Image (cartoon, grey):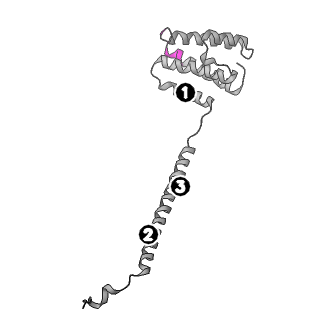
Amino acid sequence: MPSKSPHGIFELAPSRTLGLTSSLFYAACGLLLFALAVSVYFYWRSKNKSTAQTQPVLTPWEQIQLQLQRLGELSSPTESMTVLNHSLRRGMELRLKEPYTAFTSAEILTHLQMNSQFSSDFQAECAEFLKTADRVLFAYQPYEEEERVRWQKQVAQWLERMREGQTL
């Protein structure tokens, strides 16, 4: 005769609800993890959008003005003359839609003489500035601090008038 287990424990039928209950539990945990992952993604995305929108985009005229403001931080006269020279050429490009940053000083003066928007006084002063810039940048001849300050003020004034559309 087969022996019976005590209290009939092994003879009980398996519970059908136990499998369904554990499946529901695992499905709920999976849904919670999915919802958590989606919410973390949207939080990260919104945070990155807000930081990208705070960076202002500068116009070309504002970029030139910013370079001129940082001119005092430059240590060598050659660097400061490079910034002044490029700023003037870039301002003329913006005003006249000609590639003045690619032109030589002689080509710039030729273009200025052919353009009636510029007075003879401006052409003479611009020629003097370009001559000074060529002397400093290409002949490596030094120039005085007073001269640098003078040209910085003059170029800033020219650029401001160009930006406003005034005649020079």
Q: Position of residue 93 (x, y in %)?
A: 65, 21
Residue 42 disc label? 3
Residue 26 disc label? 2
Residue 108's place in the image compared with 6, above or below, is: above
Residue 39's place in the image compared with 95, above or below, is: below
Find the distance from the CA under tag 2 to the CA under tag 1.
61 Å
Q: Tag 1: Cα neighbours inside 10 Å, few (<14), some, or many (≥20)?
A: some
The reply, left or right, for residue 27 in relation to residue 1 is: right
* Residue on which disc 1 sits: 67
Q: Residue at x 49, y 19 (%)?
A: 79
Reply yes or no: does residue 72 show up in magenta. no
Mark 2 residue type: Tyr
Quarter of the C terminus within the rendering: top right
Lower sequence index among marks 2 and 3: 2
Q: Tag 2: Cα neighbours inside 10 Å, few (<14), some, or many (≥20)?
A: few
In magenta, the rendered stretch is: 139-148
